[in-house]
Amino acid sequence: MNILVCIDDTDNIESRGTGSLASELADALQNNGWGHCRPVTRHQMLLHPDIPYTSHNSSMCFTAEIRPEFMDAFTGFAQSYLQQESAAGSDPGLCIVDRDRLMDPDTLMAFGRKAKTTVLFKVDAYQLAERLSVHLSEHGGTGLGVIGALAGCGLRLTGNDGRFRGKFQVGEIGEQLTVADLMQKTGVDVVKNLEGDILQDDAPVYIGKNVKAVLQDGRSTLLVFPEPRDEAGEICWQTCTKQQLRGY
Amino acid sequence: MARVDVWEQTLSGRKRFKHGQDSYGLAAETAGQCGAFVNDDDDEAVCDDDRSCYNCRYRRWTADSFECLKP
């Protein structure tokens, strides 16, 4: 089974972040031998005075291949885990989508996109979850995290939203690697410039301070920008800064 | 030195950064003078500055700026 797992609103201002919990859930799924996970992505939703988010209103999602006989065990584990590990005062929500049985992915993706522009309500999330037969549950507080959890699944499903959690350690700042080296060291699927052009394997790329991937066209994508360092007039590239990636 | 007018008070009594979400230099300068600065999770960092209000655990983003939640 191919599943999407998303959690939201598990933290408070002093606690560890939701991304940390998402990664631990993914680790547990793998360490229990239930399946194999792909990296966690962060999805930004609307910032609005009527939304009671902690500090940034983002949810964390990962995909996994899970053996069907372990689906109930994982779901139960995830629910207990959120109940135990979520911070005081948080409003955690959990969404698990069976992608193979999802009859209307477009509606789920539309819900995700809508959460970036519109104030949504718990009833909206529960109604859609019921219609799509996806797991949606709340685990403390007001449970408002169900909105972001469902929306995060929709956004991950689009294949075109969010940054991957964590950053790559691929050498020293200012070091030059080829695209092929960079892909081999990071495991990303593709290296592109900000205009969306895929770089050739032998193109040189300077390593910036933070090397992070984003989700584009369903692939982990390392974005680079042109850097005028080469006196011969060749185009040189540098990995994007966090400022450049903040909109993803 | 950071300017003294980087903050304004909101109706709810919070400190709101007056310079929006793209004043990286000013946000770094302000954090440099703040004894309460704590880095947020790296996943929530939005600039490469080691110390910036934009990357602080106590900033709460709003639609056009952020509020400082440190009492």
Image (cartoon, coloured by chain):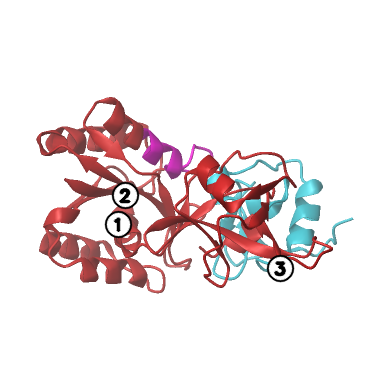
Chain letter for the part of the structure drawn in red: A
Does the CB distance between marks 1 and 3 fall below 8 Å?
no
Task: Report the Cα–Cα distance between label 2 and label 1.
Answer: 6 Å
| Residue A205, x across and y down, in percent | 66, 54
Element at label 3: loop
What label sits on residue A6 in the rendered view? 2
- Chain for numbered disc 2: A
Task: Report the Cα–Cα distance between label 3 and label 2.
Answer: 34 Å
Residue at (69, 67) in percent of width and height: B22
In this rendering, the label closer to the viewer, 3 or 2:
2
Q: Same subunit under labels 3 and 2?
A: no
Q: Is residue A1 left or right of residue A220?
A: left
Q: Is residue A28 left or right of residue A237?
A: left
Residue at (54, 40) in percent of width and height: A185
Q: Chain B drawn in what color?
A: cyan
Which residue position is annotated with label 3? B18
Which residue position is annotated with label 1? A153
Element at label 1: helix
Tell me, yes or no, if residue A95 can be seen here. Answer: no
* Above or below A5: residue A130: below
- Chain for numbered disc 3: B
Element at label 2: strand
Residue at (41, 69) in percent of width and height: A116
| Residue A209, x across and y down, in percent | 69, 47
Q: Earlier in the sequence, mark 2 or mark 1?
A: 2
Badge 1, how many Cα within 10 Å: few under 14, some, many 20+?
Answer: many
What label sits on residue A206 in the rendered view? none
* Above or below A66: residue B10: below
Give, as a three-letter code, the residue at label 2.
Cys
Does the CB distance between marks 2 and 1 fall below 8 Å?
yes
Provide the residue span drawn in magenta: A11-24
Give, as a three-letter code, the residue at label 3.
Lys
